[in-house]
Image: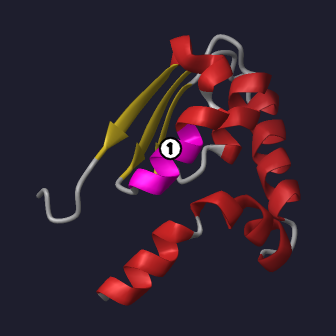
């Protein structure tokens, strides 16, 4: 990703969730369906690792549905990390943040 696109992408962290809902048809439905499938499969307290976790919007839904779960946020954006930390603060005891850096092998 060139530096201009990278900067543009990271600067949209605050608006990311609304953009997803606007640009991706069925965004909330898809998340809800995955939660429904997990419930149907009998998943009680999953360990969730989300790569490219972004703003944490999906994580907050999963953590609400699975109060016994552990969640690992993995991303490399400082801006998304800031947004996700704020959003996931109510679940702090069950969330771990892992920030990677591009090119870190």
Q: Does residue 93 lie above or below 84 as drawn?
A: above
Most distant residue in the left direction: 105
Q: Which residue is drawn at 40% across and 44% down?
A: 74
Corner quadrant of residue 86:
top right
Between residues 91 and 36, which one lies in front from this camera angle? 91
Q: Which residue is drawn at 57% across and 41% down?
A: 84
Work out which quarter of the rendered image holds the N terminus and state it: bottom left
Left/right placement of residue 44 relative to residue 12 reads right
**Residue 1 visible in the current orientation:** no
Q: Which residue is drawn at 47% across and 55% down?
A: 79
Corner quadrant of residue 42:
top right
Residues drawn in magenta: 78-84
Q: Magenta region's main secondary structure?
A: helix
Work out which quarter of the rendered image holds the C terminus and state it: bottom left
Residue 15 percent across, percent down from the top left: 70, 64
Residue 94 percent across, percent down from the top left: 54, 16
Between residues 15 and 22, which one lies in front from this camera angle? 15
Q: So how many labels did they put on this image? A: 1
Left/right placement of residue 44 relative to residue 74 reads right
The crowd level at tag 1 (other Cα within 10 Å; few <14, some 14-19, many 20+) is some
Q: Is residue 82 rendered magenta in the image? A: yes
Tag 1 secondary structure = helix
Between residues 78 and 96, which one lies in front from this camera angle? 78
Q: Does residue 93 lie above or below 36 as drawn?
A: above
Residue 8 percent across, percent down from the top left: 49, 80
Q: Which residue is drawn at 87% across and 67% down?
A: 26
Quickly name the residue at label 1. Answer: 82
């Amino acid at each position: 990703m060139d530096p201009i696109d990278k900067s543009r992408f990271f600067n949209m962290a605050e608006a990311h969730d609304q953009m997803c809902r606007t640009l991706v048809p069925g965004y909330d439905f898809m998340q809800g369906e995955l939660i429904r499938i997990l419930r149907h499969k009998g998943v009680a307290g999953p360990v969730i690792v989300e790569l490219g976790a972004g703003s944490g919007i999906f994580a907050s839904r999963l953590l609400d549905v699975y109060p016994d779960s552990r969640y690992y946020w993995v991303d490399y954006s400082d801006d998304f990390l800031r947004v996700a930390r704020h959003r996931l603060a109510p679940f702090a005891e069950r969330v771990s943040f892992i920030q990677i850096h591009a090119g870190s092998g």
